[in-house]
Amino acid sequence: MMTDASELRDFTQPDELSDFTLVIDGTPLHVHKQYLAEWSPVWRQLFLDECSSPQEPREILMPDKNLQEVTELLHCIYSTQKPISDANVKFLLELSSEFQISRVKERCEQFLKNQECSLANLVVAEKYNLHSLFKRCMDFAKTKTLEELDSSAECKKLSPQTLLKIYHAKIQMLRDYSKELTQKDRQTIKDCENLRMEKENMKRSLQGIYGLWETPSKRCYRHIADSAFNYSCPDCNEKIYFEVRKLCGEGQHLRRYFPKQPDKKS
Ligand SMILES: [Zn+2]
């Protein structure tokens, strides 16, 4: 959704219902206590504390805050709800953490999750306790080489605990990989053994074919005692034909090692 600048509320101007003022660098930002309290438990407590004081102050000085950044935060929680962007995500995270505005913080996290994973975002996730982003960036960090991690300026900003988590995840990943390789290796040895046996069987079958014509028992009863095969006898030929077919049938399963050649005509 595009937000037209003219639609944005001008917080420097009070409206009929504004009942509180945030003062930054001398500039008043007119806001509504009830509304801010709904978004931030920190602000809610602040307003409650002030209600109990004798003369209820209607403004608070925020000397350590940046006017533009706080205005942007207000734009994000008032009805205009400005979108999170590269330009505002950093300080909105900072402010929404300080004032515990969880919905803005969640929107910032969602914005960062839609970006490419990076070590920089891991630093941000750690700093502001963004669990979901942290997990995503951790999965990314573990795929980096040790050299890449060691030379990264971002990694130096991470706590030792998080660095340890990265190394731990890396070890786990490598362990899984090595387990997978071992399994593949075992399967390959098994496949090799099967192939070797099939080859031996095939060899035996083929050698058997040569002997068929020399074997008296493979002839018809009339020529069983002949010294040589009688090629002119249909019965003998038919018996041999069935024997050859039987041997070919035994080798049938080996066809899967010879994939069909693509049709040359097409
Ligand atoms: Zn015969």
Image (cartoon, helix red, strand yellow):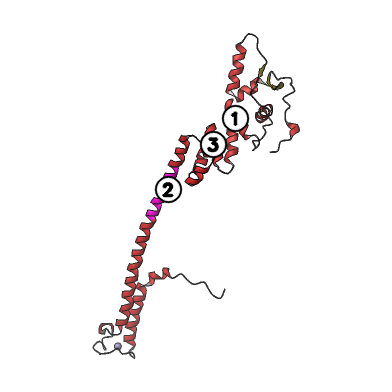
Rendered residue at 34%/79% (across/down): 244
Mark 1 and 2 residues: CB-CB less than 8 Å, in contact?
Answer: no
User: Magenta stretch: residue 172 in it?
Assistant: yes
Residue placed under numbered mark 2 in the picture? 174
- Left or right of 182? Residue 110 is right
Q: Earlier in the sequence, mark 1 or mark 2?
A: 1
> For the residue carrying disc 3, how many other residues have a C-alpha within 10 Å: few (<14), some (14-19), or many (20+)?
many
Residue 17 locus on image (x, y percent): 71, 20
**Image quadrant assignment for residue 35:** top right
- The label shown at residue 94 is 1
Query: Could you tell me the amino acid type at mark 1?
Result: Glu
How far separated are the C-alphas under marks 1 and 2?
A: 36 Å
Label 1, secondary structure: give it: helix
Rendered-image quadrant of the C terminus: bottom right
List the residue tagged with mark 3.
Answer: 123
The magenta stretch spans which residues?
168-183
- Residue 14: image tag: none
Give me the residue at 59% from left, 30% from top: 94
Instruction: State the residue in front, 83 or 90.
Output: 90
Decide which of 149, 83 is in the foreground and name it.
Answer: 149
- Asked if the residues shown at circle 2 and circle 3 are in contact, with their CB atoms under 8 angstroms apart, the answer is no
Q: Residue furthest bottom?
A: 232
- Disc 1 to disc 3, C-alpha distance: 13 Å
* Residue 4 appears left or right of 220: right
Q: Earlier in the sequence, mark 1 or mark 3?
A: 1
The kind of residue tagged 3 is: Val
